[in-house]
């Protein structure tokens, strides 16, 4: 199975990298851009054949290692 | 419109952050994980109503600022 | 002049990248490592000849763009 | 002992995050800034009392996990 995790800052947490990218895009003439948010994706292979167990495991990985759940949220996809 | 860009290291470029995450997941008992790759997502709003122009603009943003195309690839989605 | 900014998570904010690196180093046999913290450095050239003004400017850059001062601290060096 | 590792892109490798920060700083009125380069610092504690061994170990950590030596260089400090 393949897992994909998206980790992003929670709404309300200032995204400094997003702000930097937005400013730079404006400077390059892309003034139509707003609300830039930067996140992280983590993709990997998962041995095993039980999708429900896999999804539960990936959520546990997020809570224990991949995300700082005080400031970050995450989305999990297992296929 | 909403744009989403995914930037990831090209196949063959060592992903040190992915390697660190994989080692740490193994240490936590998630031995079923392999091939971890870490990427970046950049999401933003786009003023304008022409999807074809928007997609071309977002590709230009990738080539000029968002990705280092020597070592990174990108995927663009405009909706 | 040259400026160097170090941005790091405040004590008490979970450092997920540091945790991943620590787990991976342990897995590679480097069990003597603890307390891993990951930060960012931003180095650049600064036109101008007044060190006091330069330092004040760099601090303003940190507060306005380079750091999320709710969760991050920074150190500034201008030489 | 305390170790500090600085990882940075080699000269000649495009630094997209540095470029974004530079563009954004110009947009905020800090036009005196040029040549922005972004790096990563990794700080940790090291059990043991032999500084020479510690430094050799930290270099091995860099080569094996902390840096992609094809595109990145590093500096090590052990105190």
Image (cartoon, coloured by chain):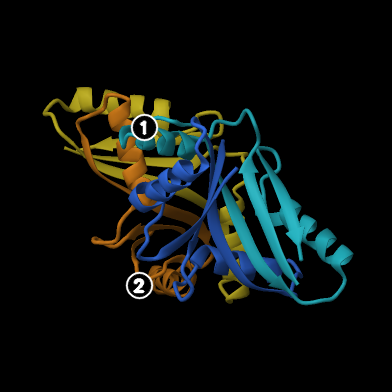
Chain colours: A cyan, B blue, C yellow, D orange
* Picture layout, residue B1 above or below residue B65: above
Secondary structure under the numbered disc 1 in the rendered image = helix
**Residue C33 appears in the figure:** no
Callout 1: residue from which chain?
Answer: A
Residue displayed at 73% across by 66% down: B28
Which residue lies under the disc numbered 1? Answer: A26
Q: Chain of mark 2?
A: D
Q: CA distance from mark 2 to mark 1?
A: 32 Å
Residue drawn at x 71%, y 64% as measured from the top left: A3
Picture mark count: 2
Image location of residue B40, percent across then percent down: 53, 53
- Is residue D55 visible to us here? yes
Q: Are marks 2 and 1 in contact (CB under 8 Å)?
A: no
Q: Are callouts 2 and 1 both on one chain?
A: no
Q: Is residue B41 left or right of residue A60?
A: left
Could you tell me which secondary element the residue under label 2 belongs to? loop
Q: Quadrant of the N terminus of chain B?
A: top right
Nearer to the camera, A62 or B71: B71
Which of B15 and C78 lies nearest the eye of the viewer? Answer: B15
Estimate how packed mark 2 is, as few (under 14), some (14 to 19) or many (20 or more) residues with alpha carbons within 10 Å.
Answer: few
Q: Position of residue C10 (x, y in %)?
A: 54, 37
Q: Could you say where residue B59 lies in the image, as x and y percent from the top left?
A: 42, 50
Q: Residues within 10 Å of mark 1 (few under 14, many from 20)?
A: some
Label number found at residue C27: none
Give the quadrant of residue A26: top left
What residue is pinned by disc 2?
Answer: D70
Corner quadrant of residue A23:
top left
| Residue at position x 74%, y 54% in the image | A76
């Amino acid at each position: 199975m393949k897992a994909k995790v998206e980790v992003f800052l929670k709404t309300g947490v200032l995204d400094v990298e997003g702000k930097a990218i937005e400013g730079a895009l404006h400077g390059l003439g892309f003034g139509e851009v707003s609300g830039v948010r930067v996140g992280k994706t983590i993709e990997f292979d998962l041995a095993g054949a039980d999708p429900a167990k896999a999804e539960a495991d990936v959520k546990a990985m997020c809570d224990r290692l991949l995300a700082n759940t005080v400031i970050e949220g995450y989305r999990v996809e297992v296929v």
